[in-house]
Amino acid sequence: MTHSLSYAATPVIELNHEGVNGVRLLVKREDLNHPFVSGNKWWKLKYNLEEAKRAGHDTLLTFGGAYSNHLYATAAAAHELGMKSIGIVRGERTEPLNHTLSFAESRGMKLHFISREAYRKKNEHEFLQSIRNQFGDAYIIPEGGTNEFAVRGCAEFAKTLEEEIDFDYLCLPIGTGGTMAGMIEGLSSNKKVIGFSSLKGGDFLKDEIQLLVSNTQLDWQVNTGYHFGGYGKSTPDLISFIEDMKMNYQLPLDQVYTAKMMMGVFDLIGQNYFEHGSTILILHTGGLQGNHSIK
Ligand SMILES: *Cc1c(COP(=O)(O)O)cnc(C)c1O
């Protein structure tokens, strides 16, 4: 039995974008770090897996929607480490299962579907107690994987980024904000971090992230202008942008997170938002598995 997840070193590529207004654009292809536990999910799970083992759990239990990258990654991680996994899924089971859920099942995850109303209580104490009664003493990871262990893993990743690459701005997509919190914690204060919200009405994210960080030196902000209709929603523009990026740069992007962020970055470059001569590091957080299910 292995004790930690496999990890592949990932490349940094430069985008020679025609519209680059005197800035350097780098992409860290962290989506390539693991075939199934990809991108930020690898780092968010790292210390959760250690903690689960330390506390003697043999089962991981977590939550997600039917397209959740986190459910997918958790199922794969549990499988690789010889652990069991349970996924509490929002909504009804519909056959055939989509790519995300059928993959999770293929990795041994037991899927348990609950109504949207019940799912809303997922963080409440009573609900979690009933889950424990029903499924036994599993190690519970919140939806999206965000908790203090996730932030610690992402902060560690941020430090490796800074050692490897010279950059001024770090751009990344945001779901719950856990990854961004890790970046803020791990980077030194001369960096600027810009997170792009993948959901509509993401103004609350600033407060959520604030709760997860103690580093007050670094300049960071949440950009809420590029959600393209909201979480999981897309537009024809976004779809054709994804095709363009694939054709022009051989860069695959996902619809839910990375494409929205990338369009945001290009748009801001067009507005001369970034300081002339600066280097922008774009974090490819993975999520490509989702492209099999959506459309
Ligand atoms: C989960 C995910 C995110 C969001 O990460 P948070 O830590 O929840 O903000 C961003 N990008 C991809 C590809 C993801 O799978």
Image: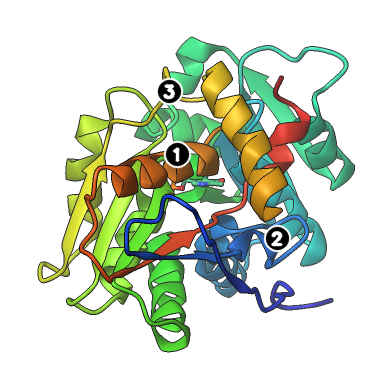
User: What number is the disc on residue 263?
Assistant: 1
Residue found 67% across the figure and 79% down from its top: 9
Q: Is residue 246 above or below residue 33?
A: above
The residue wearing badge 3 is 228
Q: Quadrant of the C terminus?
A: top right
Cα separation, mark 1 vs mark 2, equals 41 Å
In the displayed structure image, the side of residue 99 where residue 73 appears, left or right: left
Instruction: Give the residue type at disc 1.
Output: Met
First in residue order: circle 2 vs circle 3: 2
Location of residue 174 in the rendering, given as x and y in whole percent from the top left corner: 39, 44
Instruction: Give the residue type at disc 2.
Output: Asp
Q: Please tell me in which quadrant of the rendered image residue 285 appears.
A: bottom right
Location of residue 164 in the rendering, given as x and y in whole percent from the top left corner: 47, 86
Is the C-beta separation of discs 1 and 2 under 8 Å? no
Residue found 70% across the figure and 24% down from its top: 294
First in residue order: circle 1 vs circle 2: 2
